[in-house]
Image (cartoon, rainbow, N blue to C red):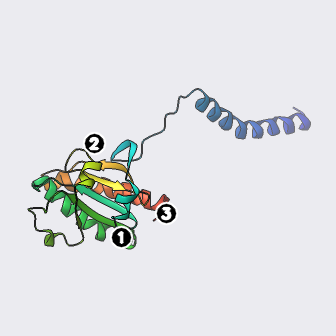
Amino acid sequence: MTSVKKSRATLIGVILAFALPVIGAKFVLDQSWYQGAATNKGTMLMPPIKLSDELQSRLPEGWRVALVADNECGAACVQGLYAMNQLDVALGKESDRVKPIVFSRTPLDFDLEQTPLVIPIISDEFPAAFADIPPHRLFIIDPLGNAMLHYATFTEEEAMRAEAKNLLSDLRTLLKLSRIG
């Protein structure tokens, strides 16, 4: 091979080395072969539950992690309250952006002094707004009043710890990507 042919072959090889992956990626995306992976660990609410402006004004500012409790706070409810109370420590410097809340129609039969960071809100409107979510679920509310993800609560401490880690992972991601609250 002459030096001109070697130069052309090298140039074509370099161009193909950069162009083929781009062309391949475009082809894969056009054919819808790549679906992407869901990165959230909670259950996405589609569409999100939007709080009215009146309800939104009665909540603390920023991101909220909430639990809707019925009149009796059973073992799953108690485990959820403990998990929410521990978010303050787990979030570290981001803890001032998140407020844990428990909604109920009547005062709970659980002593909230054991979970001092959880803010109780006693009202009929909030449990009614979240009627689509099963009782004793933890859920994330953004600063604009959209409940978007929910998580199960468990009576067993180990299972609840694992679910709290899932909530914490999603919450950290949301806080990192959020430009609000």
Image coordinates for residue 97, horizontal then vertical, percent: 39, 68
Q: In this rendering, which labeled residue sits more in front, label 1 or label 2?
A: 2
Q: Is residue 25 above or below residue 110?
A: above
Q: Residues within 10 Å of mark 2 (few under 14, many from 20)?
A: few
Which label sits on residue 105? none
Q: Earlier in the sequence, mark 1 or mark 2?
A: 1
Residue nearer the viewer, 101 or 22 = 101
Question: Which residue in the structure is indicated by mark 1?
Answer: 95
Q: Is residue 121 left or right of residue 61?
A: left
For mark 2, what is the residue? 132
CA separation, marks 1 and 2?
28 Å
Question: Looking at the image, which is closer to me, 174 or 124?
Answer: 124
Q: CA distance from mark 3 to mark 2?
A: 26 Å
Residue type at mark 3 is Ile
Q: Name the mark on residue 180.
A: 3
Q: Quadrant of residue 54?
A: bottom left
Image point 53% across, 28% down: which residue? 33
Residue 25's place in the image compared with 31, above or below, is below
Dot 3 and dot 2 residues touching (CB under 8 Å): no
Query: What kind of element bears circle 1?
Result: helix
